[in-house]
Image (tube, rainbow, N blue to C red):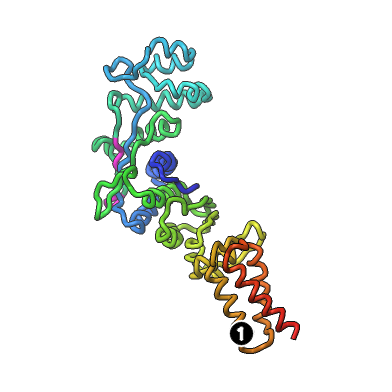
Amino acid sequence: MRGPGLTSSGSISLISSAASGLLEKLKTRNSLDRLKPVFKVLGFEPNLDFVFKPMFKNPYHEESYEYDYEKVVHDTGPVFYGLQESLGIAIDPRLSNQILNLPEYAMEEIRFALSIYTDFFFDRPHFTLSVNYDYTWEYTFNRHHHNDRQLLSAVLLLLNYGLIKLMDLRLSKPSNPNLSLRRASSGEQCMLVIMLGIAGHISDYSKIFIDEPEISLHPQWQEKFMSLLIDVFESYEGCNFYIATHSPQILSKLSSKNCFITSLTRKEIYNSSEFRERSADYQLAEIFDAPGSMNEYIVRIAFKLMSSLRANERLSNENILDINKLSNFSKLLSESDPLHQLIVSALDMGEYYAAN
């Protein structure tokens, strides 16, 4: 799963996948008891409102799609025509190619799901699926049709085939009882999309891949990310999380237990304890090979080396390690960086005392 960007449409696209997973768990009642802690850790009430829009309408309704129904159904071929004609619906023409490329078994699934759905919401432009926890997980459609598993199955199938579109996700928290995902901050969107996305699909012994979760996250959220991830999913057994990141804040807050850092450029694996609670400048220099300008961690190494050499007038083993580090760091710095000249001076001192 990749962290979402700043656009709410990107978040909605990603949360649609999470919605499918969450609704599948709701339908099968599989691991539902593990969903409540997700909301608690994130500071939300265990309530969700999914707002869906059907991508089809009653062709004879006054507010149906503004196109020639007879022309479209004939132009899109006999299969698409037959599906619409037999069910008496007008499917959004943008979906015609997608529908026509489906195998026959999928068309039969859609036909059956539409027959269930149209009995309930045929002329509605949108509908809401409300999910809440009160001793057990319950759900209703438009505040009616309580725990209707057949309707839920139909909605889930139509969602997976693109015939129903998720328009919004609403949550509740003490400070905002009706928080729309579209109106949430980019940081809240990112955290919700990632955590709910994982919650919708995780099971024991899962392998979870997360790509650049820091996108759209303020540094404070980045520092909280790992602890939230561990707290939310600690009840699952045997899971492995693989996270690609360029965030020093995320690395610095890794747990010292069962966490490891792999450098793809160096092809080396490090225990997270080497980097936990270390500064961003340390992470940038030691693991990302991108120290930036006037890196304070490198500055401290240079001044420490020069101070030690002046005081002892000889090279110690620690001094030699520092010299090797500074020599490697100098290759990563621009010559216009004032730190580059400081390293040159420190290395010159090292050569002087090595020769004497």
- At 63% from the left and 57% from the top, the residue drawn is 264
- At 30% from the left and 24% from the top, the residue drawn is 122
179 vs 122, nearest the viewer: 179
- At 62% from the left and 72% from the top, the residue drawn is 343
Q: Is residue 25 left or right of residue 271?
A: left
Say if the magenta span includes residue 255. no
170 vs 305, nearest the viewer: 305
Which quarter of the figure has residue 67? top left
Label 1, secondary structure: give it.
helix
Q: Main secondary structure of the magenta part?
A: strand
First to last magenta residue range: 128-136
Q: Is residue 107 above or below residue 291?
A: above
- Direction bottom: furthest residue: 312
Answer yes or no: is residue 184 visible. Answer: yes
Q: Is residue 270 above or below residue 76?
A: below
Q: Which residue is mark 1?
A: 308
Which quarter of the figure has residue 64? top left
Say if the magenta span includes residue 134. yes
Q: Position of residue 7 (x, y in %)?
A: 40, 42
Q: Position of residue 102 (x, y in %)?
A: 51, 25
58 vs 94, nearest the viewer: 94
Q: Say which amino acid is labelled 1.
A: Ser
Q: Is residue 291 left or right of residue 121?
A: right
Q: Position of residue 25 (x, y in %)?
A: 41, 44
